[in-house]
Amino acid sequence: MMELNKQIKKYRTMMNLSQEELAEKVYVTRQTISNWETGKSYPDIHSLLLLSSLFNVSLDQLIKGDLEMMRETVSKKEIREFNFYGGIFSVLLLGTVVTVAPLAYFLGVYGIAITCVLFTITMIFAFKVEGYKKRNNIQTYKEILAFCNGERLDEIARKQEEAKRPYQDILKVLISGTIGFVVTMILFKLLEIFF
């Protein structure tokens, strides 16, 4: 639960200020102070600095409980979005690999064009996933699993994972290319047999 609203009310009361008096000192309306104290809205950074100075407390002291909650909320949001975009990317990648041969076989050039469009959309989601990985400094499978579970690796485990990254990148490219090629060839052969 956010604590800033209680902190503002506590310090205002300790200083024997009405909501209107506090509002004048931080250049907002009395209604704004009321909204802050009831938790309906949150002060901007300029107002937080004014409140901190007026109450003669550090900004950290004023919003301490709220900072932890904000970090946790941002982290959970990042994890949800990462999982969402990762899921879409996985489905699109699988769809692209599985449909390339049938589309090319049945529709010829048009099928290849459809595959190119599907591949482009897949790459858009791949870049979104990579953006999350870069922002949160996660690259290896172990780091991704830890991130998805809302955890962080300790320093030794992180260094070990960072050392694996160059090798894993090469392996990912080779394995992905091989799997894509094999699946496409199998699908082409199956299509030739049945059609």
Image (spheres, rainbow, N blue to C red):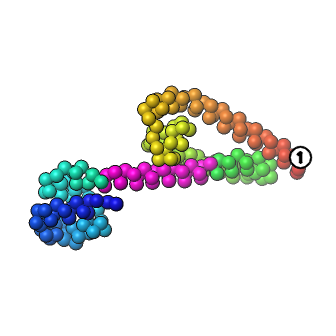
Query: Residue 103, position in %: x, y?
Result: 75, 51
Residue that mark 1 sits on: 193
In this view, 67 is above or below 17: above
Instruction: Give me the residue at 28% from left, 59% from top.
Output: 3
Residue 70 is covered by the magenta coloring = yes
Query: Residue 158, position in %: x, y?
Result: 46, 33
Instruction: Give me the residue at 49% from left, 39% from top.
Output: 138
In this view, 47 is above or below 60: below
Pick the residue in front: 82 or 154: 154
Query: Residue 159, position in %: x, y?
Result: 46, 29
SS for dot 1: helix
Quadrant, the N terminus: bottom left
Range covered by the magenta-colored residues: 66-90
Instruction: Give me the residue at 69% from left, 51% from top.
Output: 95
Q: Is residue 43 visible?
A: no
Looking at the image, which residue sits at the far left?
Answer: 16
Q: Is residue 164 visible?
A: yes
Pick the residue in front: 63 or 50: 63
Q: Amino acid at mark 1?
A: Ile
Q: Which picture quadrant has residue 27?
A: bottom left
In this view, 132 is above or below 177: below
